[in-house]
Image (spheres, grey):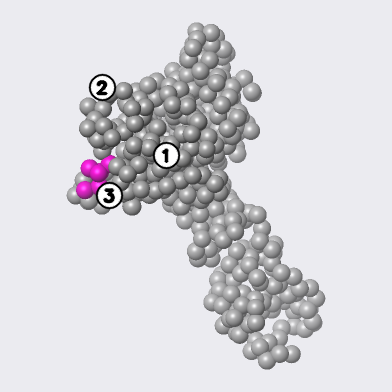
């Protein structure tokens, strides 16, 4: 049951998604009413790779529920450096905390960790694998702004390595969205994600250009194309330029389009988009707090 | 006795693995950990004409019966294989391999970023799909050359 351990967006049914988003909306409306929910609870933040943003977001969410967090600090300073396995670390931390948030560079790390502990565990990103809480806040943002009915979503950028994309694609099949994937050929969806989409009977199309489908989109979800994925700089620049958007390009879009991005962005969304009604990425980031509060509240209650 | 069977000598007791797709016999030996150094008498027939498969391979291993794990992995590369247990030159038991739902601890994950390739106390586990296997941890799908991913230990 996902309310014990959320390692993949694939665990979430439509009913699960609605339950978390409804609860998040409730919290969003009146956060003060939830301020004493978990005053006796401790959440452990195990971040094996730096992610200030996601770590702070979980820390804020837990503290807004009245709880507290413990943190192993930087990986360099911890027992990890001395060679302790992840399996041992989570078993030790299980004795200290009421829940664990794990960010780890290896794919499948959260799946493995969940096999070793009984406390609630949340996957906060496992390499190029999954990032289910990002997906929940993405869905919350979409539902709030455009709704799930007859939804058409374009997802653009690095679709190969982007775990937020993989999790989101899995979840969008639950709300029957039409999904358009826009990327250079070298950064198309990996086979394992295509397999899941195919198995789920998802309505999916792949493109290399945005123009052809931009006018039909309700949501344009942009991700960063990472320079380090390319053997040389010129190859990167040739590709990256094609997947940048600016205010002028968005003139062809529907007035109701929202532009989303998991952040941080580099130059894939020009600053002139920020002032338009399309821009939704900062609100999207803020939504991480009520959504993570809702999730932690449900998981810690369930214990 | 048919002409085809004559190509590979009879064994007194042990196991005959028949109806292996042509060219997969050496991979079957790899799954069984047989490289000739352990002293078992082994005969291999390769690309023998077969009504069912066109060309098939046959492996006969003297004085050895297979574990379920071994049969499970063989089924991944030879889904039509039959396993014949021989005692005193007679076929004692004959059965087709069945593809398991999952195989544990026998394949290595080809994804270098998979947690199963870290120094963690975790056994690999692959879910068996129609025409591939999929890592339960990183979800990587392995469709071709499954035999190349058999663990060394
Ligand atoms: Zn794997």
From the viewer's perspective, tell me whether residue A45 is left or right of residue A182. right
Mark 3 near mark 2, Cβ–Cβ under 8 Å?
Answer: no
Question: At numbered mark 2, what does the secondary structure look like: helix, strand or loop?
Answer: loop
Residue B62: % across, % down: 69, 78
**Residue drawn at point x = 42 percent, y = 47 percent:** A205
- The mark closer to the camera, 1 or 2, is 2
Residues behind callouts 1 and 2 on a single chain: yes
**Residue drawn at point x = 32 percent, y = 25 percent:** A279
Question: In what quadrant of the picture does the C terminus of chain B appear?
Answer: bottom right
Q: Is mark 1 within 8 Å of ligand 1?
A: no
Between the residue at mark 3 and the residue at mark 2, the CA separation in whole angstroms equals 32 Å
The residue where tag 1 is placed is A165
Which residues make up the magenta segment? A238-243
Between the residue at mark 1 and the residue at mark 2, the CA separation in whole angstroms equals 25 Å
The residue where tag 2 is placed is A275
Q: Of the two numbered discs 3 and 1 on the same chain, state the one appearing first in sequence.
A: 1
Residue B36: % across, % down: 57, 77
Between the residue at mark 3 and the residue at mark 1, the CA separation in whole angstroms equals 19 Å
Question: At numbered mark 3, what does the secondary structure look like: helix, strand or loop?
Answer: loop
Q: Is mark 2 within 8 Å of ligand 1?
A: no
Chain letter of disc 2 in the image: A
Chain letter of disc 1 in the image: A
The residue where tag 3 is placed is A230
Residues behind callouts 3 and 2 on a single chain: yes
**Residue drawn at point x = 39 percent, y = 20 percent:** A286
- The mark closer to the camera, 3 or 1, is 1
């Amino acid at each position: 049951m996902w309310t014990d351990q959320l390692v993949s967006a694939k665990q979430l049914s439509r009913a699960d998604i609605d339950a978390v988003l409804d609860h998040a909306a409730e919290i969003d409306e009146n956060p003060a009413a939830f301020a004493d929910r978990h005053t006796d609870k401790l959440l452990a933040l195990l971040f094996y790779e730096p992610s200030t943003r996601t770590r702070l977001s979980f820390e804020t969410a837990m503290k807004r529920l009245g709880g507290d967090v413990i943190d192993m600090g930087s990986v360099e300073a911890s027992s990890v450096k001395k060679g302790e396995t992840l399996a041992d670390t989570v078993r030790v931390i299980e004795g200290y905390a009421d829940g664990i948030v794990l960010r780890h560079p290896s794919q499948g790390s959260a799946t493995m960790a969940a096999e070793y502990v009984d406390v609630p565990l949340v996957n906060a990103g496992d390499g190029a694998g999954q990032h289910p809480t990002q997906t929940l806040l993405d869905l919350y943002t979409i539902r709030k702004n455009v709704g799930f009915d007859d939804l058409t979503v374009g997802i653009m950028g690095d679709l190969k390595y982007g775990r937020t994309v993989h999790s989101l694609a899995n979840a969008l099949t639950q709300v029957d969205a039409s999904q358009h994937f826009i990327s250079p050929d070298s950064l198309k969806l990996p086979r394992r994600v295509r397999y899941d989409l195919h198995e789920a009977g998802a309505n999916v199309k792949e493109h290399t250009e945005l123009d052809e489908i931009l006018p039909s989109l309700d949501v344009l979800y942009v991700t960063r194309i990472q320079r380090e994925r390319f053997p040389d700089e010129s190859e990167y620049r040739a590709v990256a330029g094609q997947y940048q958007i600016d205010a002028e390009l968005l003139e062809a879009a529907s007035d109701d389009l929202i532009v989303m991005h998991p952040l941080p962005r580099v130059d894939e969304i020009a600053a002139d988009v920020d002032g338009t009604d399309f821009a939704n990425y900062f609100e999207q980031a803020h939504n991480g707090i009520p959504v993570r509060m809702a999730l932690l509240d449900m998981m810690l209650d369930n214990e | 006795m048919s002409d085809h069977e004559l190509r590979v000598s009879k064994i007194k007791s042990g196991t005959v693995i028949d109806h292996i797709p042509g060219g997969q016999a050496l991979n079957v030996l790899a799954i069984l950990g047989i490289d000739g150094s352990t002293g078992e008498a082994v005969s291999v027939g390769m690309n023998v004409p077969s009504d069912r498969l066109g060309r098939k391979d046959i492996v006969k291993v003297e004085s050895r019966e297979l574990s379920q794990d071994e049969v499970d992995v063989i089924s991944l590369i030879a889904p039509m294989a039959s396993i014949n247990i021989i005692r005193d030159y007679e076929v004692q038991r004959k059965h087709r391999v069945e593809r398991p739902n999952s195989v544990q601890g026998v394949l290595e994950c080809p994804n270098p970023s998979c947690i199963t390739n870290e120094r963690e106390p975790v056994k690999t586990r692959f879910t068996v799909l129609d025409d591939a296997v999929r890592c339960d941890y990183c979800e990587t799908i392995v469709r071709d050359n499954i035999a190349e991913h058999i663990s060394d230990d």
